[in-house]
Amino acid sequence: MDVLSNMQQQRANVEQLRREAAIERQPISESCAKMLKYIAEHEQEDYLLVGFSSQKVNPFREKSSCTVL
């Protein structure tokens, strides 16, 4: 019974490796160029770079100050 389960596990491993081998790959240089293009096109939408137009639209602002009684 142990040999049968081991063979099933090995078949599952082989099938997984075949699926992974079939995935289309890209060269790093191509991927980096696409990322740089995306970043350049969307940098005006990045609040970490341009900030918020006002404190009201900032979701990270302090909601209220802490008051000690």
Image (cartoon, helix red, strand yellow):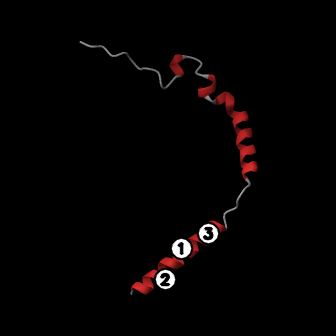
Which of these two is toward me, 44 or 10?
Answer: 10
Q: Give coordinates of residue 7: x percent, y percent.
A: 49, 83
Q: CA distance from mark 3 to mark 2?
A: 18 Å
| Residue labelled with disc 3 | 19
User: Which label lies toward us, 3 or 2?
Assistant: 2
Q: Can you identify the residue that label 2 sits on?
A: 7
* Above-or-below relation of 45 to 36: above
- Distance from the alpha carbon under mark 1 to that under mark 2: 10 Å
Which element is circle 2 on?
helix
Question: Residue 27, located in which quarter of the rendered image?
Answer: bottom right
Q: Quadrant of the N terminus?
A: bottom left
User: Can you identify the residue that label 1 sits on?
Assistant: 13
Near mark 1 (Cα within 10 A), the count class, few <14, some 14-19 or many ≥20, is few
Instruction: State the residue in front, 66 or 10.
Output: 10
Mark 3 Cα within 10 Å, few/some/many (few <14, many 20+)? few
Task: Where is residue 59? Give x, y as percent.
Answer: 49, 26
Q: Position of residue 61 (x, y in %)?
A: 47, 21
Residue reaching furthest left?
69
